[in-house]
Image (cartoon, rainbow, N blue to C red):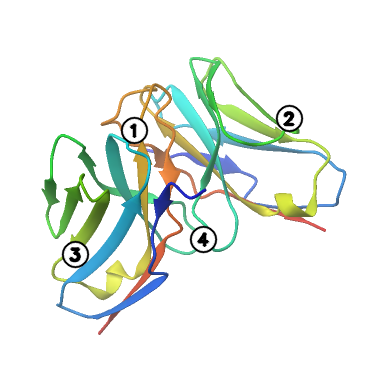
Amino acid sequence: DAGVTQSPTHLIKTRGQHVTLRCSPISGHKSVSWYQQVLGQGPQFIFQYYEKEERGRGNFPDRFSARQFPNYSSELNVNALLLGDSALYLCASSLTAGTANQPQHFGDGTRLSIL
Amino acid sequence: DQQVKQNSPSLSVQEGRISILNCDYTNSMFDYFLWYKKYPAEGPTFLISISSIKDKNEDGRFTVFLNKSAKHLSLHIVPSQPGDSAVYFCAATFGSARQLTFGSGTQLTVLP
């Protein structure tokens, strides 16, 4: 069975540009979450979506937005890119949202570099 | 403010011995705790979890212990194998969104 797939794997952008990252969850999973991991730190929560609705938002500026599609795939959009947005962006999926004993399963991430 | 802390950035252990990774948390609302393992160029892989109503959970070579009064959890790997060499993250959740709050990770190196 395919795991969580993310595209692209690597991306280089310049300051001020915008970027769209994509995620396909494990088949049957209806919840998708996004995390940002900067070097030397653990992943930090950005958004969670379940059944196309936002269920949670982390402490990120409004330049970050996301959506979930009817097939449960998701996009993360970041506008007006800053140097500090350089990070590994991880997508995770789970069967549902809000159930403790359903661990989130992660994709391999998109490495975003801002020049 | 870091609600989940892993104070040891790195740990080296001899093959066959026990590896003990530690994690502390400050938010008493957390009611579910997880450990993830991460290899370079891969996403985190779920290892083991524990609910706050338990104090121990085992899965093969991996055991997680939770001390709620001390707000401390630990992951024991016995016996350690070279393939266990990776970065280990502890994470905690609570509430309806169940977002994961991660520690900063511990690099485990198991020496042959």
Q: Camera-side residue: B112 or A27?
A: B112
Q: Amino acid at mark 3?
A: Ile
Q: Looking at the image, which residue sits at the far front?
A: B69
Chain of the residue on which disc 4 is drawn: B
* Residue identified by numbered label 4: B41
Q: Residues within 10 Å of mark 3 (few under 14, many from 20)?
A: many
Q: Residues within 10 Å of mark 1 (few under 14, many from 20)?
A: few
4 and 3 marks on the same chain: yes
* Residue identified by numbered label 2: A62
Foreground tag (2 vs 1): 1
Q: Secondary structure at mark 1?
A: loop
Please state if B104 lies on the left or on the right of A109 as rendered: left
Mark 3–mark 1 distance (CA, rounded to whole Å): 27 Å
Q: Secondary structure at mark 4?
A: loop
Please state if A67 lies on the left or on the right of B27 as rendered: right
Foreground tag (3 vs 1): 1
1 and 4 marks on the same chain: yes
Mark 4–mark 2 distance (CA, rounded to whole Å): 29 Å
Report if the CB atoms under discs 4 and 2 are less than 8 Å apart.
no
Q: Amino acid at mark 1?
A: Met
- Residue at image point 22% right, 73% down: B81
Q: Residues within 10 Å of mark 4 (few under 14, many from 20)?
A: few
* Residue identified by numbered label 3: B77
Q: Amino acid at mark 2?
A: Asp
Is residue A102 at all visible to an observer of this figure? yes
Q: Amino acid at mark 4?
A: Ala
- Residue at image point 24% right, 53% down: B73
